[in-house]
Image (spheres, grey):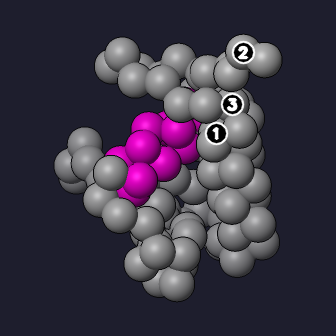
Amino acid sequence: MKKENIELSGGFSVSKYGYECFREIVVASLPEMNPGKAYNLKKILGREIWSQLDHGDRRLMGRCVAHMVTQKALPLSFAESKHEYPKRYQLQ
């Protein structure tokens, strides 16, 4: 059986399974978000989940969430920020 990958920006890819797992984690956090407020991924996930991810997983998850927002797979949009990173998101 061939593993399906999702192509992200910058030449990165992730397994479809990993991508969907990340999406489900973010979807579970959406009810805690306030409309009009900007959140970075650490705030969206919460300290408990964030602390379980190593540096590489955090970066990969950030790339995945940015891709999901671009592809409209989440009800989020990019929020204005003084800096490019970390990306900030808000509910649509």
Q: Position of residue 30 (x, y in %)?
A: 72, 65
Displayed quadrant of residue 9: top left
- For residue 14, above or below residue 29: above
Q: Nearer the viewer, residue 9 or 17?
A: 17
Q: Main secondary structure of the magenta part?
A: helix
Q: Label 3 near label 1: C-beta < 8 Å?
A: yes
Q: Nearer the viewer, residue 51 or 88?
A: 51
Task: Look at 69% across and 61% down and name the residue there.
Answer: 25
Q: Which mark is nearer the camera, 2 or 3?
A: 2
Label 1 and label 3: CA atoms lie apart by 5 Å
Displayed quadrant of residue 40: bottom left
Displayed quadrant of residue 74: top right
Mark 3 is surrounded, within 10 Å at the Cα level, by few (under 14), some (14 to 19) or many (20 or more) other residues, namely some
Tell me the tag on residue 19. 1
Give, as a three-letter code, the residue at label 1.
Answer: Tyr
Please state if 23 lies on the left or on the right of 51 as rendered: right
Label 2 and label 3: CA atoms lie apart by 11 Å
Please state if 13 lies on the left or on the right of 24 as rendered: left
Q: Which mark is nearer the camera, 2 or 1?
A: 2
Tell me the tag on residue 16. 3
Where does the N terminus fall, quadrant-wise? top right
Give, as a three-letter code, the residue at label 3.
Answer: Lys
Which of the marked residues, 2 or 1, is nearer the chain's N terminus? 2
Pointer 2: what residue?
2
Task: Look at 53% across and 31% down and name the residue there.
Answer: 14
Label 2 and label 1: CA atoms lie apart by 16 Å
Q: Nearer the viewer, residue 83 or 1?
A: 1
Task: Look at 48% across and 48% down and name the residue there.
Answer: 61
**Span highlighted in magenta in the image:** 57-68
Q: What secondary structure is marked by label 3?
A: helix
Q: What secondary structure is marked by label 1?
A: helix
